[in-house]
Amino acid sequence: MRQERVLCLYVPHFRVLAERWRRPELATEPVIVHHGGKRPLVLEGCALAARSGVREGMLLSRALSLCPQATPLPADEEYYQRRQRESLLPWLRLTPEVSAPGLGLSFMETRGLERLAGDEQALARLVLREWEGFAAGMGSAPADPAGPAAPAQVGIAEGYFAAALAAQHGDRPVSLVAPGREMAFLAPLSLGVLPAPDADWREMHRRLRLLGLNTLGDVARLGRVAMQAQFGLPGLQAWRLVANDPQGAHVFPGVEALRGSLIRPEVEAGRQFEPALISQADLETALLGLTEEVARGLRREGWSSARLQVRWQVEARPEATRAVSLKEPSAAAADLLSAVRRVLPEVLEGPVVELGVRAEALAPQAGKQLTLFQKRKASQRLAQVGADLQKRLGQAVLYQVQTLGPSHLEERTFALAPR
């Protein structure tokens, strides 16, 4: 059984890069990001710090003795994750199956994207252009005094593990591993690229090196039975990774982690009002406009929402928020407005100077079968779906069946015409 072709975008030193976006004065200075309390540890260093011997997990005091000119910064994981998420939002125009299980490491499956982006080489170039455009918009100057601006690499291979290593260890910005050639690509790589999530894996690493096994190819040649006999479950999982066995797909980076890290678009609408809203009719009109804007954004991205966050500000009072849930995920303006109306009694406590609605708990829209003999409402809904698809994917994505007439050849009975 073959694995899906997967694209991986790798951005090294992502935390350092994000800090330089926030502090442009550090654009050409060495940086070390650290975490911990009284004895902080290095979480990530720039390329120049790494060349000076700074490594992840090292005491910060030791790192600064190796690279005394570096600026130490405490880690801000929430900020880094937000920046990574923003950089990947353009991917959602191609597919909702976008995941970011780790900072600087992002994935998408390439199946079905040929009509939208072209072949894999074209898709990889598109992803790099999107990243470079985002980095330029963040105002990134030279990303490192020892390297190029905002470096990023793309790898495409069967399976997440092979795709990640193609991106991380490729010798060019785009590295494509031909289908079926993953084991040959992985074979010369060092054992150090294998994960080590716990003590059992670290002990396996140590014993493999004592046995004189230093590459993934050595592990593959040792064989599944021997690896499992020597190291138990970690040995079996490691062999499955290096053999690119589909049963090892959950080991790296983990199906649950990938599903939990799906990137979702920001869909939000807000307004300020001068003069302030004082009547329920005016408030309803404003909420109708906001929910219609959110609904258009959801349909454009191919998502639906199960929860809305409503925020408002009444004159001379601090901003207030409330979450309201829908009965089922929807991208219809009427459903969103119905949910938002529940907060009207709270909002009408005074003149409203600001309103906002944000879609949360997003999920890809599910298809809904319409009746064969459509009523007017269903026909209108179908027309709306068609218009949304054409906006997202272009004009030549929908076709209408035309009857050519009776024929003994099925292909001459009907024809497809662009809609």
Image (tube, rainbow, N blue to C red):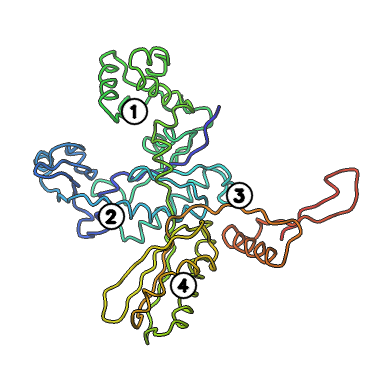
Secondary-structure class at tag 2: helix
Q: Whole-Å distance between the Cαs marked 4 and 1?
A: 49 Å
Give the side of residue 16 with respect to residue 130, left or right.
left
Provide residue 33's location: percent of width, then percent of height. 20, 47
- Report, in whole angstroms, how far the alpha carbon at label 1 lies from the one at label 2: 28 Å
In percent of width and height, residue 323 lies at 38, 63
Question: Which residue position is annotated with label 1?
Answer: 194
Residue linked to disc 3 = 115
Amino acid type, callout 2 = Tyr
Q: Which of the two marks, 4 or 2, is nearer to us in this view?
A: 4
162 to 367, vertically: above or below? above
Task: Count neighbours of disc 1 (C-alpha within 10 A) and say few if under 14, some if 14 to 19, many if 20 or more.
Answer: some
Judged from the image, the secondary structure of the residue bearing numbered disc 3 is helix
Relative to 369, say whether 48 is above or below: above
> How far from the left and from the top, in percent, is residue 360?
42, 58
The N terminus lies in quadrant: top right
Q: Are marks 1 and 2 in contact (CB under 8 Å)?
A: no
How far apart, in angstroms, are the residues tagged by discs 4 and 2? 28 Å
Q: CA distance from mark 3 to mark 1?
A: 35 Å
* Left or right of residue 108: residue 33: left
Please name whichever residue, 177 or 107, is drawn nearer the observer in this view of the structure: 107
- The structure residue drawn at horizontal position 39% and vertical position 30%, both measured from the top left corner, is 251
What residue sits 53% from the left and 65% below the top? Answer: 335
Which disc number belongs to residue 290? 4
Residue at 66 percent across and 57 percent down: it is: 396
**Residue at coordinates 84% horizontally, 44% vertically from top-left?**
410
Q: Amino acid at mark 3?
A: Arg
Q: Looking at the picture, which amino acid does disc 1 mark?
A: Leu
Q: Earlier in the sequence, mark 4 or mark 1?
A: 1
- Which numbered disc covers residue 79? 2
**Mark 3 in CB contact with mark 4 (< 8 angstroms):** no
